[in-house]
Image (spheres, helix red, strand yellow):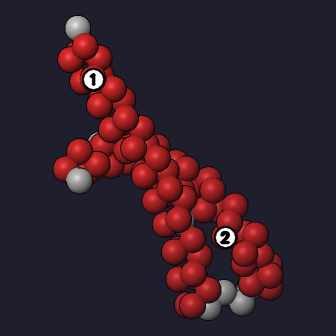
Amino acid sequence: MRLFLKYATSRVCVGRACKVALLVGTVLAVINHYDAILSGTLGATTILKMLVTYAVPYSVSTFSSAMQGIHMELHDQETELKR
């Protein structure tokens, strides 16, 4: 868990996840709520749903980046032990 948090909170991982969330979250929000956006009937509930939509790509990106970092670190350690 400590290793996961090390990578999940790194500047590179957070930056990448924010970019992914902004792009993918916007696409998902428009797809899911285009009718309310176009009609101008955005209520508090819809806005909250749209904001939560950004959490999904952020979480997926963070998880995959952190797991890749862990994999690379463990692989490097394994390689060092074999030498």
- Kindly identify the amino acid type of the residue bearing the numbered disc 1: Glu
Residue 37 falls in image quadrant: bottom right
| Left or right of 65, for residue 83 | left
Q: Is residue 2 visible?
A: yes
| Left or right of 76, for residue 34 | right
Residue depicted at 53% across the width and 83% down the height:
48
Residue depicted at 28% across the width and 48% down the height:
4
Task: Say few, some or many: other residues with alpha carbon within 10 Å of mark 2 (under 14 / 14 to 19 / 20 or more).
Answer: some
Q: Is residue 12 visible?
A: no
Task: Say few, some or many: other residues with alpha carbon within 10 Å of mark 1 (under 14 / 14 to 19 / 20 or more).
Answer: few
Q: Position of residue 30 (x, y in %)?
A: 72, 69
In the image, 70 versus 12, the foreground residue is: 70
Residue depicted at 23% across the width and 45% down the height:
3
Q: Which residue is labeled 1 in the image?
A: 78
Q: Position of residue 41 (x, y in %)?
A: 72, 90
Q: Earlier in the sequence, mark 1 or mark 2?
A: 2
Q: Which residue is labeled 2 in the image?
A: 29
**Residue farthest to the front, as pictured:** 82
Instruction: Give the answer, above or below, for where 22 lies relative to 33.
Output: above
Q: Position of residue 44 (x, y in %)?
A: 55, 90
Q: Position of residue 59 (x, y in %)?
A: 46, 59
User: Label 2's element?
Assistant: helix
| Left or right of 44, for residue 75 | left
- Kindly identify the amino acid type of the residue bearing the numbered disc 2: Ala
Of the 4 image quadrants, the one containing the C terminus is top left
Q: CA distance from mark 1 to mark 2?
A: 43 Å
Residue 43 falls in image quadrant: bottom right
Residue depicted at 33% across the width and 26% down the height:
75
Q: Number of marks in the image?
A: 2
Instruction: Give the answer, above or below, for where 36 lies relative to 59.
Output: below
User: Label 1's element?
Assistant: helix
Q: Nearer the viewer, mark 1 or mark 2?
A: 1
